[in-house]
Structure formats: C-alpha cells, structure tokens
Image (cartoon, rainbow, N blue to C red):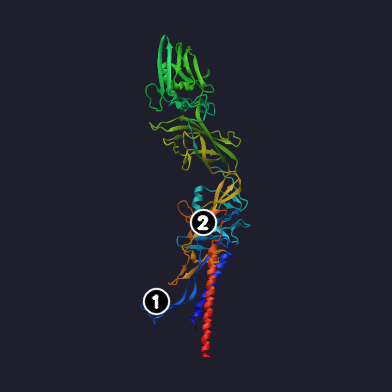
C-alpha cells in the first residue's frame, strides 16, 4: 500500500487529537484552577534502509506520527480576589486534597501513603460549607486537612498554644468541619503573662500609697530602705538625685557657724557624707547636724497624709540655711530661718515612681474579674556595683465592678538588669475560686518587660488563657493554610489547616473529571506496581514551625485557568494547518493509487 496514505492518515489523526486538546483548553479558559494540556507528537515507526548508501549518510525511513503525550501544564494561573468565605488559592507547587467520604482520610508517610478511600487533588479552591458544616468543593467532595478536634457540636473548647502547634504538624488529613453557629465555651483563667515597660521618670503616685498597707499600717522599714532617687516632688517631677545630688547646710547656733555638704550616691557603698537611702540621709542629718529628718507625724507618732519630709530641731535655737540642687528640687529651701527647739520645717507632699496594670481574668462561668498589680520603684540600681533596678509589686484580685474580691495581697519584686530587661522569675501562684492562676509580669515569651527611659510606662502585651463566652465573628485562613476563628469575646484560635500535598512528578497524575486529578499506577519492568506521580509529599514541615514548604495559601482569592489564550489560538491555527496539509497529502496518495490501478487497465 502507498505509505503516503498511511503517513497522512496518522498525521490527520494526530492533529485531530491536538485540535481536540487545544480546543478543550480554550473551552476551559474560565474554569477555576484548570490545568491546560500540552499535546506532543512522535514518529510512529521508522526503519533503517541498508540497500541505500548508509555508510556515509543517514538512510532512515519514518512511517507517520502518533500522539506522544498530553502533558499537564504546571505553571500557575492568575489570582483574582473573591468574596467567598472559604474561597482560597494555592500559589506554589502542590494541590488541595478532596475526597468523597466524610469518614475518609489520607495519611502521608515519608515514602508512602494510606487512604481509606480514593482521594483526589485539585487547584480549584472555590470551597463552601454544606448543611452539616463540612467544607466541600463545587462537586460536593469533602475538603481534607488537619482538624484539631476543638469543636463538639457547635461548642469550641480551646487548647494550649503548644498543643495546637504540635497538632497542626500532623500527617493525617481528614474532612474539615466548621459549623455555622460556633460558641466559644467559657474557660477559667489559669495563666496570665504580662510584658510592660516601666519608666522611672514619667508616672508617680503619692508616697503614702506605697508606705501604708491595705490595713492602714505604716511600713517603717520600707521607708528606711527607699532609694531617695525613686522620689518625686509635689509637682510630680522626679527628684533625679543623680543630677540634683547635693544638699548644702549652714547652721548658726550659739554664735557658732557650721557648714555641711551631703551628696547622693547611686552606690550602696557610701563615701564620706554620702547618702543613698532615706535611712542614710536620716543618719547624716542626726550625726552631723543634730537635726532629725523624718516624715511628718501626728502626736501619736502616726505619719500624716499626704506624706512629706519634716526636718526637726531637737537642740538649741538656731538659724538654718538649706540649699543645693536636691533641696531646691524638693522645695525645702531655707535662708537663715530661725528655728527654735522642737520646731520643724515641712516639705511639700512626696510622690514615688509608680505604675499600675490591670489584666482581665475569668472564672469557669465566664464572669470577668481583674488582676491589679501596682509597681513602686524602691531601688534605681547602678551598673558600677551591678545592682539591679527593683520595683516592689503588689497584686490583688478585683471583681468586674472593680471592688476588692480577694483580701490577700501578693507582694514580690520586679528587677531589671543593665540591658533594661526584666530578670525572669518563677510566676506567682494566685488563689482564685478554688483554683490557681500562674501569674507573671516579667514578659510574654521572648518579649521581656523593660525599663526603657525613652518609652512611656505601658502594658505592652498580655497573654491569658481564660475567656468569657463568645460567638463566632470571623474566619480567616493564613498563608500557611491555618484556619483561625475569631470570636466576639476577643478570642482567636486555630481549629485546623487546609491540606496541601505535592508530587515529585505531576505528570503522573490522571484526570478524574470535575477539574480533579487522582493517583495512577502502572506495572514496571520488574512486575511491581509503581506510583507514576510518586507518593504524596506533605505540604508542610512536620518539624520546626510547621510552615508550608512549597508555596502559600491566598485566602479569598481564586486561581484562574492557566490556559494561555494567545498561545492556544496560535497552536490551534498550526494544528488546523497541519490537519489540512495532511489531508492534501492523503489526496495525493489517493491519486497515485488511482493512477496505479489505471496502468493495469
């Protein structure tokens, strides 16, 4: 038979396949997540003709063409915004996972996988919820992923951050379910962490608030130990004793004049006529001048409010001159002031560097309470002796109306090192409604509390595990595919992640209709079943942070078809031309056959 007819027939047939494939790509130009096909051809048969001069030139003869492959294009389509609540696109190498059965699963091991049913893979992320709350695609197939199991019925019970992080790296994918009306179950607070900045120069409170306890008892020892540099004057300006560090005294008594100079030292190891604490200053006045420095007291010896310094003469009458930058800042400047025996001079009201934080806590019914902590600076510290800055802290629980709920006050210290960071300590264990709260204010994780002078005192971050009841307000999917729910009570929590898998050879996947693909197998030369695409590869790192390895999720976006319309139309013309030319060749072969038949006649 005339080989021209055979060759042209195979060409017609192959180009018809190409036309079918390209026209299908064009037909799906607006199909979400569609992967276009690339038809490729190869020679059907060939032989080497030894009777021709094959010693010097090629003497091959080919017989027609056939389809070599209809490859899947793995390039990404475009990404367009979408209003669908669960619409999402995947940018990178990999596929979403779907299945027919709501009880199905797909477990992915390092070099193998196990599925309880047939699983399918798609780039079409136009997902929605069915009547039971399951995430499904447009064909009703269930969307697979990692379900953290927090939702029972329509009630969500939260877990710890550490548990969530571990569970989100699981390798077993199951259908995802997010009911419409989810309620965040009230949970009792068991842990509170605060990160704050305390500025020694900004905020203050009356000194009496620090030196009287809740029962009205005056704390004499705290007064003596107090670093003078922690005080503010009545204009709420810090005394700043490191700069305003001198006290100058001149006493005229019994026709004799004496002068003294006292200086503030940031160090606790004092030199001559130096002071650091109030007790140091009291001793200097008593031993050097005979004057008594104390806070003003009533006849019963109880300090009067508001607290103020009182300088009392317990000796013969004198004329007193007080000056120096420290005295000027304090507002106690005197010039030749006559002071009789047992008379005293009083300063203005004293303040101390202070700050207050409040953190919400909840009981098991979701009722709100507060943990209030007051911070009082009592030691400004110094780098010379490597002495940390210290704040006395007092913590107490109040009810929602901000009335005292627990009588017990928890007192401890908060220290800052030379790097302006809080020194980590064991959390306080606070009693609350027959339970315990682990409470710390030295930092949240790696965000340590600080004492930066260029930043106002402020509560920077709060992390607590208790919540009141809340209703679902918003759903978001982050770039790692983690589904997070947001509630009206301010809670946000992950409930799972969208499943992503990749394959070593996407070309080994088989189209299953409805814009989905499935795993295919073939028998190799050894007679063993071989997975053409390779076993599925988990899309996220099951160690470390568990982030997606090959791409990222785009929530409320959809991936368009990756068909290149311009290229498709060009190839369509080429295929059409190829088809026409092969038809011409077929006609030529047919004419030759007719002539051969006519020769016999």
- Mark count: 2
Q: Say which of 99 and 68 sits in front.
A: 68
Name the residue at 54% across, 74% down: 580
- From the viewer's perspective, tell me whether residue 386 is left or right of residue 303: left
Most distant residue in the left direction: 55
Q: Which numbered circle lies on residue 58?
A: 1
The picture quadrant where one finds residue 273 is: top left
Image coordinates of residue 321 in percent, x first then y, are: 45, 15
Name the residue at 61% across, 52% down: 154
The picture quadrant where one finds residue 225 is: top left
- Reading the chain from its start, which is encountered first: label 1 or label 2? 1
Image coordinates of residue 92 in percent, x first then y, are: 50, 57
Q: Say which of 406 and 477 sits in front.
A: 477
Q: Which numbered circle lies on residue 91?
A: 2
Q: Say which of 309 and 477 sits in front.
A: 477
Name the residue at 49% across, 17% down: 345
Which marked residue is nearer to the observer: mark 1 or mark 2?
Answer: 1
Dot 2 lies on which element?
A: strand
Dot 1 lies on which element?
A: loop
Q: CA distance from mark 1 to mark 2?
A: 48 Å
Image coordinates of residue 373 in percent, x first then y, are: 52, 34
């Amino acid at each position: 038979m005339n080989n021209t007819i055979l060759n042209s027939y195979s060409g017609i047939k192959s180009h018809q396949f190409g036309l079918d494939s390209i026209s299908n790509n064009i037909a799906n130009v607006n199909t979400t997540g569609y992967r276009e096909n690339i038809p490729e051809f190869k020679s059907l048969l060939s032989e080497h003709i030894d009777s021709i001069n094959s010693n010097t030139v090629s003497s091959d003869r080919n017989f027609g063409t056939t389809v070599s492959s209809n490859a899947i294009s793995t390039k990404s389509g475009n990404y367009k915004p979408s209003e669908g609540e669960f619409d999402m696109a995947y940018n990178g190498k990999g596929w979403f996972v779907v299945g027919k059965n709501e009880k199905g699963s797909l477990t992915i091991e390092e070099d193998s996988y196990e599925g309880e049913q047939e699983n399918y893979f798609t780039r079409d992320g136009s997902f929605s919820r069915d009547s039971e709350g399951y995430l499904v695609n447009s064909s009703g197939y269930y969307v697979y992923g990692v379900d953290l199991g927090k939702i029972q019925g329509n009630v969500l019970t939260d877990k710890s951050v550490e548990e969530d992080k571990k569970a989100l790296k699981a390798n077993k994918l199951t259908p995802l379910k997010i009911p419409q009306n989810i309620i965040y179950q009230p949970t009792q607070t068991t842990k509170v962490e605060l990160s704050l900045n305390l500025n020694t120069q900004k905020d203050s409170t009356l000194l009496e608030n620090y030196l009287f306890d809740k029962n009205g008892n005056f704390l004499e020892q705290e007064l003596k130990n107090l670093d003078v540099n922690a005080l503010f004057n009545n204009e709420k300006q810090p005394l700043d004793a490191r700069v305003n560090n001198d006290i100058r005294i001149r006493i005229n008594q019994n026709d004799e004049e004496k002068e003294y100079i006292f200086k503030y030292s940031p160090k606790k190891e004092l030199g001559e006529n130096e002071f650091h604490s109030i007790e140091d200053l009291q001793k200097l006045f008593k031993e050097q001048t005979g004057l008594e420095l104390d806070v003003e007291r009533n006849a019963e010896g109880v300090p009067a409010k508001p607290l103020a310094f009182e300088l009392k003469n317990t000796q013969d009458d004198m004329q007193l001159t007080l000056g120096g930058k420290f005295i000027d800042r304090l507002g106690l400047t005197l010039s030749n002031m006559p002071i009789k025996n047992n008379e005293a001079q009083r300063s203005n009201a004293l303040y101390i560097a202070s700050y207050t934080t409040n953190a919400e806590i909840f009981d098991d019914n979701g009722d709100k309470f507060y943990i209030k902590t007051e911070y009082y600076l009592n030691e400004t510290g110094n780098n010379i002796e490597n002495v940390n800055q210290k704040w006395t802290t007092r913590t107490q629980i109040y009810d929602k109306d901000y009335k005292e709920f627990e009588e017990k006050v928890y007192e401890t210290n908060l220290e800052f090192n030379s790097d302006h960071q809080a020194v980590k300590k064991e959390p306080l264990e606070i009693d609350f409604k027959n339970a315990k709260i682990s409470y710390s204010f030295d930092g949240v994780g790696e965000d340590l509390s600080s004492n930066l002078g260029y930043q106002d005192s402020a509560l920077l971050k709060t992390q607590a595990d208790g919540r009141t009841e809340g209703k679902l307000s918003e759903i978001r999917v982050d770039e790692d595919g983690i589904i997070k729910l947001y509630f009206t009570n301010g809670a946000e929590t992950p409930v799972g992640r969208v499943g992503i898998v990749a394959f070593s050879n996407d070309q080994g996947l088989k189209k299953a209709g409805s814009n989905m693909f499935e795993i295919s197998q073939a028998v190799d030369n050894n007679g063993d079943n071989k997975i053409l695409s390779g076993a599925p590869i988990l899309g996220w790192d099951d160690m470390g942070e568990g982030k997606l390895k090959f791409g990222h999720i785009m929530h409320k976006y959809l991936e368009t078809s990756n068909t290149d319309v311009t290229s498709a139309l060009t190839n369509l013309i080429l295929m059409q031309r190829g088809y026409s030319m092969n038809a011409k060749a077929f006609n030529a072969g047919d004419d030759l056959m007719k002539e051969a038949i006519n020769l016999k006649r």
